[in-house]
Amino acid sequence: MTPIQQLEVRSGELRKRLAEIGGLAELSDEIRNELDTLKAEYTDNDSRQAALKMAGDIPPEPVETRQDDGEGKELRELRHNVHFEQYIAAAMAGGGIRNGAELEYNQHLGIAANYFPLEMLAPKPLETRAARDGDAMASQASWLDRVMAGTAAERLGVSFRTVSPGVATFPATTAGGSPVQRGRTEAVTESTYTVAVTEIKPSRAAVTGKYSIEDDLRLPGMADAIERDMKAAMAEDVDRTIFIGDSGAGEANADIAGFNTYTNVGEASLTQSNKLKADETLKVFLAQLDGIYAASLADLRVVASKGANTLWFSTIHAAAVDNQTVAQFLMASGMTWTMRGEIESNTANGDFGAFMGLARGIEGAAIACVWDAGQLVRDPFTNAKSGEVELTLNYFWNFKVVRPNNFKRLKFVT
């Protein structure tokens, strides 16, 4: 074992003991002295490891390629020993995590003992290993991306971000500088970027489930069901609100604006007579191609309402010619889309038919932040007479459209 490997092993032992001390309710003078000694040794270990690496006295470690939240290898290994059912059990006991790998994991992430990491609700990341080097691996990006995979918001191009406690701020370039070509000795015209900072504050959401006190006896199996259902409920809530918003759901009763009400998101219109015509419908979508952020129909990320989707698939646009539906005509022209319920169920005047994201340069144009700490609250009192217990998941998130020009919405008009 090399010197640096010995230091790494010792650092792991120190972290484990520090986590055990962190879970104690009270600290004696002896424990406090031990805590000070451990912290000093841990700091010294880090310094010695850094010095060895800088001196180049050790061979380079195998390169590990990942696409994830940036956790270190040790944190990922710790994650394998963390189990959602322990958080469920702690909540049902009326308290937070007190010891074990779960407490150490919370401390690594800076999450209080009475909260739990929302990433526990995400499917496990898929890992692939290179054929030649068994140490190299790649996995899916982040837990939030895995939770929101397959949603309409992901299809539209909304960027999902995990956030630590606090207010999330994101810089955005709202107007780009224009490059200028000049000849020898000619002056270049000044070109300035306009940069704005978007602030996103947490908004609380909750999912509540009821179970009987008899179900406590079947906790191991029930924990899996709670994990699955809460993940699905959270993903559905975030996805739906991104499109239709939520009145009074933000801080100080401010609204969370969805794409249907968001200011400055451009609108394209389709008249009641033209909505039955496939060629006129196609023209509306083609008009959104600007040759910069959307160069073809493949660059349009389209999410249709239930009403528009039903209209396109059920309307024959030219029975005497080819008997195609509007949907068949659009798909034959190269257009694809997905459908999201609850946007609109009809195609009346003023109803939205679809939302579009211009795929090029769309990263960060709309941000959905989910704070990475959630809270499980057990309430055995409200329905005590019927023997029912409520288990509520509180989580925090919010949504902002940073660059509205990256999105369009289609509205049916007279």
Image: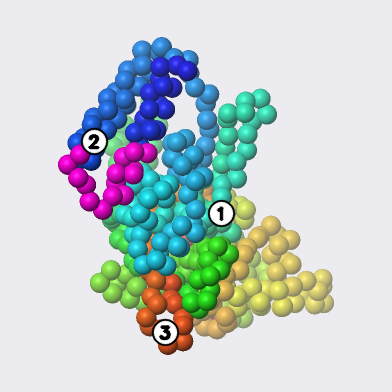
Q: Position of residue 97 (x, y in %)?
A: 37, 56
| 308 lies left or right of 195 | right
Mark 1 or 2, closer to the camera: 2
Q: Is residue 17 magenta?
A: yes
Read off the residue under disc 1: 123
Mark 3 near mark 2, Cβ–Cβ under 8 Å?
Answer: no
Q: Residue furthest left?
A: 29
N-terminal of the two: label 1 or label 3?
1
Identified at 58% across, 30% down, the residue is 136
Q: Which residue type carries mark 2?
A: Glu
Q: Is residue 233 magenta?
A: no
Mark 1 near mark 3, Cβ–Cβ under 8 Å?
Answer: no
Q: Secondary structure at mark 1?
A: loop
Task: Point out the stretch of residues depicted in magenta.
Answer: 16-30
- Mark 1 and mark 2: span between their CA atoms? 39 Å
Closest to the observer: 343 or 233? Answer: 233
N-terminal of the two: label 1 or label 2?
2
Mark 1 or 3, closer to the camera: 3
Identified at 45% across, 36% down, the residue is 74
What's the mark number on residue 383?
Answer: 3
Identified at 81% across, 74% down, the residue is 323
Read off the residue under disc 2: 34
Q: Mark yes or no: residue 87 visible.
A: yes
Number of marks in the rendered image:
3
**Quarter of image, res 340:** bottom right
